Image: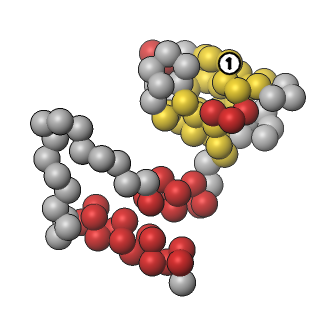
Amino acid sequence: MTVGQRVLAVHPKTGELKTGSILTAEISKFDVRFDNLDLGIALIKDYNLVPIGESIFILVHEIELEPQPGEPVPDPKSTSYLARQRSTKLKHN
């Protein structure tokens, strides 16, 4: 990965996946400026980030998250559920 490249990274304080840009690159760690200015700049290990591109779009759409207590269960007829099914079929064909 290179300086200026867009990435999806795990923020070290929140543990959430967030988008940002690489500011500095070392062997196995990167300074990432997160798009959300409140998150600032953080040093991220190489295994906690991936470059943003077409392949990450498919990966994110295939992640099946378990509903948290109190959250509604996804409706199989909903638009987002159907889009996830189409993304999965496209990758496997």
* 58 up-or-down from 49: above or below: below
Res 62 → quadrant: bottom left
Q: Residues within 10 Å of mark 1 (few under 14, many from 20)?
A: some
Provide residue 2's location: percent of width, then percent of height: 80, 38
Q: Give left or right: position of 18 versus 81.
A: right
Q: Residue furthest bottom?
A: 93
Residue 3: image location, x then y, percent? 78, 33
Position of 72 compared to 65: left or right?
Answer: left
Question: Whole-percent x and y of residue 13?
Answer: 49, 16
Q: Which residue is mark 1?
A: 43
Residue under the point 13% across and 36% down: 70
- The quarter of the displayed image where residue 86 is located: bottom left
Q: Nearer the viewer, residue 50 or 71?
A: 71
How is the rendered protein coloured? Answer: secondary structure
Report whether residue 74 is seen: yes
Residue 37 visible = no
Residue nearest the observer in this picture, 87 or 64: 64
Spot occupied by residue 16 in the image (x, y as percentages of width and height)? 45, 30
* Residue in the picture at 57% in, 54% down: 56
Q: Nearer the viewer, residue 4 or 44?
A: 44
Total numbered badges shown on the rendered structure = 1
Q: Quadrant of the C terminus?
A: bottom right
